[in-house]
Every structure is written in C-alpha cells, then in structure tokens.
Image (cartoon, rainbow, N blue to C red):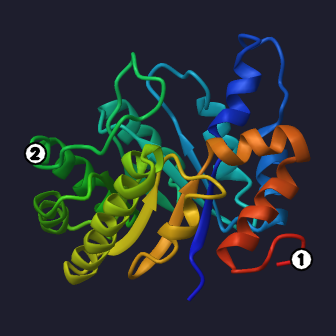
Amino acid sequence: MAVRLGINIDHVATLRQLRAGTVDYPNIIEARNLAVRGGADQITIHLRGDRRHIQERDLSDLARERGPTLLNLEMAPTSEMVKLALLYKPDYVCIVPEKREELTTEGGIDVIANKVLIEGCVNQFKRAKMKVSLFIECNSDQIKTSRDLGVEAVELHTGKYSLAKGDERKKLADHLFKGGELVHQAGLKVHAGHGLDYENVKAILKMPYLEELNIGHSIVCRAVMVGLYQAVKEMRSIMNGVPAGQDP
C-alpha cells in the first residue's frame, strides 16, 4: 500500500501574512490544487492560536472546496479550536502541542499529562464522527495512552531524527521503526512527520506499517525554486521509489 502524502501548506500562508493581511496572495486554494496535481493525497494545515500563518478563512475555504483530497487540521486541545474543528469538520483532526514562543512545533504532545483535556476533545470529535490522531513522541507509554483514548492514529514526531546526523540518525530511525511496530500492535494507524526533507525521508519510508507522512517546510522551500507542483511531484517520486528525472 502506498504511503499517503500529506502536504502541510502553512508556510504558503506565512508568505501571505508577512504583508500583515494587506494582500490575498499566495492563494491557499491554488496551492492546494497544485499540491494535488503534484501527487498530494492530503492537505495539512495548523490553525494556531496566534494565527501566525493559517487563518480561519483558510480553513473555511479548504473545508468548503474539498476537492479530491483529504483535509487534515492540526490543532491545540483548546475550546476555541474544538469549536472550529466541529464547525468545519475536516477529514482528520490531529491534536498537537502549541507554545506561542516556538518557531515550529517542538515535540509531541504529552498525552499522559494532558489525558483528561485530550479525552474531552476526542470524545467531542468522536460524537461528531470525526477521525482523530495525536502527534506524539515515540514512547511506549505515550502510545499506550493514545490507544486508551480511542483515537484512530498517532503521528510519530520525526523532528529529532530529522536534525540528527550519522550514527545518531540511524539510532533514532531504529527507535521510530520500533515505535511503528508498537503503534500497530496497539491497533492504531501509523503516521509520521516533522522536519522531513527529500533526503531524510528515504529511511523513514521503511518504517513498519507506515500509512501517512506529513511534510511541509522542505517542500515549500523547494517550491520557491521550482514551483509547488514540481516540488510535490519530486517528493511523490521519492515515495514511489522512482529514480530522479523520471515521471512517477
């Protein structure tokens, strides 16, 4: 089974928001359409409390004009975000940690320490028949608690792996692979993401039972040089095992 490719387009909105709301480009729907043409199976956005990139209108537009691909909403477990998720009903909700001062999400959410809070969110989404994943560290206790919360999937945080080099990267890859096994044994779907690029993704594609990858920053950066369609197409080719320069 091919691994589902989720393209995070937050940083398309970052470019627009650099003009502090005075321009309406680049257009989120156009970005979604180009990503889909390039091979995206899913569009991922993170609506943050500080609205530093994605805005509510982006979520509204993407939810209204679904197109042929899935919509995955990353969100902190706050009452504001729960209300918005229930209003727009994306195909998946991924609950993530969020700190205002961070440049990007710095790690997985602690589902043990925040179990009551997360459980309240999950129960509301389940009543609305929405699918839920949790963005977590690759840790057996975090995986077991995620199972107990009754979600469909967990997204394993690949940030530390992505930043590591040499033997340390291989060690972290092996750790993630064992985590994939544990997630599957817990009866959950295996997703992964954060910090992945055109090189380090190749090892992660070997993760047992992997069903979904979410990749954003490296693809948007590549798109500055070659365009979003081509940037996504190149990642899709890698995931399909096609040599560079050949069509996927």
Q: Is residue 77 visible?
A: yes
Total numbered badges shown on the rendered structure: 2
At horizontal 17% and vertical 49% (from top left) the residue drawn is 111
Q: Which mark is residue 161?
A: none
> Left or right: where does residue 127 sit relative to residue 146?
right
Residue type, label 2: Val
Q: Earlier in the sequence, mark 2 or mark 1?
A: 2
Residue 144, given in percent of the width and then of the height, sits at 12, 66
Can you tell which mark lies on residue 116?
2
Query: For this rendering, which residue is in front, 53 or 168?
Result: 168
| Residue 244 position in % (x across, y down) | 82, 70
Please provide percent x and percent y for residue 194.
Answer: 48, 48
Q: Residue furthest front?
A: 167
- In the shown orientation, is residue 186 left or right of residue 49? left
Of 195 and 172, which appears nearest the observer? 172
Q: CA distance from mark 2 to mark 1?
A: 49 Å
Residue 11 position by quadrant: top right
Please state which amino acid type lies under the numbered disc 1: Gln
Helix, strand, or loop for circle 2?
A: helix
x 21%, y 75%: residue? 182
Residue picked out by circle 1: 246
Q: Is residue 133 visible?
A: no
Say which quadrant the N terminus sits in.
Answer: bottom right
Q: Quadrant of the C terminus?
A: bottom right
CB contact under 8 Å: marks 2 and 1: no
Q: Secondary structure at mark 1?
A: loop
